[in-house]
């Protein structure tokens, strides 16, 4: 009987998929923006057709947005969508743990 290989999770699927820390940060930001867009759509009770008009986007783009296919959408575009849905994006940054190499690079 073969044993299944296991991997310890970092508790964040994006981190576990092997993206660089920089790519992971970008994906997380886009994911958060997308989640807020979906919340706003639900708050307003908008159909896909209505969303096409509100965002002034064609049906294929709205379909991608609603299905979470945001890899080709920029943070700028997602921010504009939120604005058009009556939301303001407010950015907050916070320190994160640095690797020894990052600490050294920043001290230079």
Image (spheres, rainbow, N blue to C red):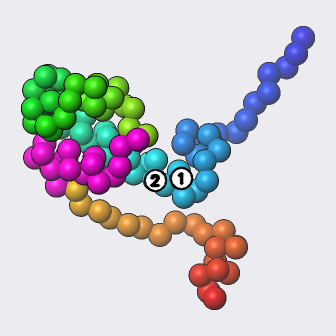
Give the secondary structure at mark 1.
helix
Q: Position of residue 36 (x, y in %)?
A: 26, 42
- Vertical comparison of 4 with 89: above or below: above
Quadrant, the C terminus: bottom right
Q: Position of residue 15 (x, y in %)?
A: 58, 46
> Does the stretch in magenta take in 56?
no
**Would you say residue 10 is visible in this rendering?**
no
- Vertical comparison of 53 with 94: above or below: above
Where is mark 1, residue-wise?
23
Start-end of magenta stretch = 72-88
Q: Residues within 10 Å of mark 1 (few under 14, many from 20)?
A: few
Q: Residue at x 58, y 56 (%)?
A: 21
**Would you say residue 60 is visible in this rendering?**
yes
- Vertical comparison of 32 with 59: above or below: below
Where is mark 2, residue-wise?
26
Q: Position of residue 37 (x, y in %)?
A: 24, 39
Q: Position of residue 104 (x, y in %)?
A: 67, 81
Q: Residue at x 57, y 67 (%)?
A: 97
Circle 1/circle 2 CB separation < 8 Å:
yes
Quadrant, the N terminus: top right
Q: CA distance from mark 1 to mark 2?
A: 5 Å
Label annotation for residue 1: none
Residue that sits furthest to the top in the current view: 1
Q: Residue at x 53, y 53 (%)?
A: 23
Q: Residue at x 75, y 30 (%)?
A: 6
Q: Residues within 10 Å of mark 2 (few under 14, many from 20)?
A: few
């Amino acid at each position: 009987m073969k044993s299944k290989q296991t991997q310890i999770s970092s508790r964040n699927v994006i981190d576990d998929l092997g993206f660089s820390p920089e790519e992971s940060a970008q994906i997380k930001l886009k994911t958060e923006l997308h989640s807020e867009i979906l919340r706003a759509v639900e708050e307003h009770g908008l159909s896909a057709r209505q969303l096409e008009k509100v965002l002034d986007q064609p049906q294929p783009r709205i379909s991608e947005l609603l299905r979470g296919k945001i890899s080709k959408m920029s943070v700028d575009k997602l921010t504009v969508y939120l604005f058009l849905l009556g939301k303001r994006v407010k950015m907050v940054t916070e320190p994160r743990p640095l690797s020894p190499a990052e600490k050294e690079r920043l001290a230079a």
